[in-house]
């Protein structure tokens, strides 16, 4: 029976490859891995990218001197802390304490990296690296901006309450305090110019001094529920709606009332999701 021409050709090619010398294999495009690994390293170690390296050099390790006020772990890197602060602010029904230390650190990294990228953009060999780093910088800027937008939304919703209760002075940044005061002044001027000035003098006050709490819109912490992850074992936590204490284990995912479990967040024992 006649043999298959394609099988015969494949067998001949295999025999020729086995008999070929290492030099012939290199000429054919194959890489001798041991030979490559035995080659001496480049002088000076890793290639120099002109000072523009990965953001991980500044954000991939725990930054010394950074501490969090509430709801974060000291073992997290700055970018991990930023991500968790962002999630916490979006999930919490009330305004949380401003994490100015980490935000300032991240902003400094963004400013330095942006300047370095601009200096290297004219070099053709740095084009791909600048593109990657620009994407990383934009990702950081998005989280920082979204964090501030979320906070400003809460301040606008509850500005009179935050200012009357002085919570904005305890939880806000200097810029947020100034924004809250200006927002309340504009709101009062708008209401007074629209209709309050046409009411009898006794009714022109937009907030009843005798019942200020009833006149101000406040965060609905009593009826808000959150999803959170437990960061450490919690033994016999007292829940008002249950007779027996609750035991929470590290890593547990729980859905609960903010009024009940908000204290655990303020103590840094849980992370919101």
Image: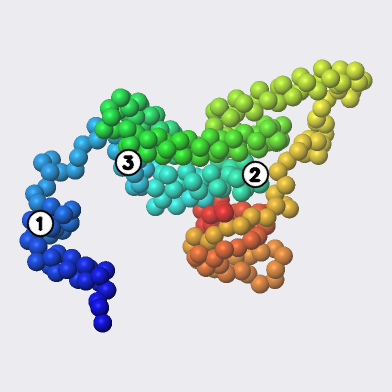
Of pointers 3 and 1, the one earlier in the residue sequence: 1
Measured in 3D between alpha carbons, the distance from the residue under mark 3 to the one under mark 1, in whole angstroms, is 39 Å
Q: Which residue is mark 2?
A: 94
> In the current view of this chain or complex, which residue is farthest to the front?
1
SS class of the residue under badge 3? loop
- Residue 32, how many percent across, how many down? 14, 58
Q: Quadrant of the N terminus?
A: bottom left
Q: Nearer the observer, disc 2 or disc 1?
A: 1
- Contact between labelled residues 1 and 2, with CB atoms less than 8 Å apart: no
**Would residue 170 be visible to someone looking at this image?**
no
User: How many other residues sit within 10 Å of disc 1, few (<14), some (14-19) or many (≥20)?
Assistant: few
| Residue pictured at 39% horizontal, 52% vertical | 75
What secondary structure is marked by label 2? Answer: loop
Image label count = 3
Sort mark 2 into few (<14), some (14-19) or many (20+) by Cα contacts within 10 Å.
some
Q: Can you say whether 247 is above or below 136 in the image?
A: below
Res. 24 mark: 1
Mark 1 secondary-structure assignment = helix
> In the image, 214: left or right of 6?
right
The residue identified by callout 3 is 54
Front: mark 3 or 1: 1
Which label number is shown at residue 206? none
For the residues labelled 2 and 1, the Cα–Cα distance comes to 72 Å
- Please name the residue shown 92% across and 20% down the image: 200
Residue 21 found in image quarter: bottom left
Q: Residue furthest bottom?
A: 1
Q: Residue at x 46, y 39 (%)?
A: 139
């Amino acid at each position: 029976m006649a043999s298959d021409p394609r099988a015969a050709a494949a067998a001949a090619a295999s025999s020729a490859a086995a008999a070929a010398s290492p030099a012939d294999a290199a000429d054919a495009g194959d890489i001798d891995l041991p030979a490559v690994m035995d080659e001496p390293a480049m002088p000076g170690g890793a290639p120099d990218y002109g000072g523009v390296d990965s953001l991980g050099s500044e954000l991939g390790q725990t930054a010394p001197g950074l501490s969090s006020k509430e709801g974060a772990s000291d073992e997290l890197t700055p970018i991990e802390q930023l991500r968790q602060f962002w999630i916490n602010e979006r999930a919490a029904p009330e305004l949380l304490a401003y994490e100015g230390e980490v935000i300032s650190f991240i902003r400094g990294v963004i400013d330095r990296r942006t300047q370095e990228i601009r200096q290297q953009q004219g070099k053709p060999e740095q084009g791909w690296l600048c593109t990657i780093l620009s994407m990383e910088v934009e990702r950081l800027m998005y989280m920082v901006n979204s964090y501030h937008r979320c906070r400003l939304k809460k301040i606008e919703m509850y500005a009179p309450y935050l200012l009357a209760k002085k919570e904005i002075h305890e939880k806000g940044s200097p810029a947020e305090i100034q924004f809250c005061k200006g927002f309340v002044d504009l709101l009062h001027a708008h209401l007074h110019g629209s209709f309050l000035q046409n009411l009898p003098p006794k009714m022109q006050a937009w907030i009843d001094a005798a019942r200020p709490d009833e006149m101000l819109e406040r965060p609905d912490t009593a009826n808000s529920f959150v999803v959170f992850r437990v960061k450490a074992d919690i033994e016999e936590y007292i829940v008002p709606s249950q007779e027996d204490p609750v035991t929470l284990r590290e890593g547990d995912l729980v859905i609960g009332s903010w009024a009940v479990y908000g204290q655990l967040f303020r103590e840094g024992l849980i992370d919101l999701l």
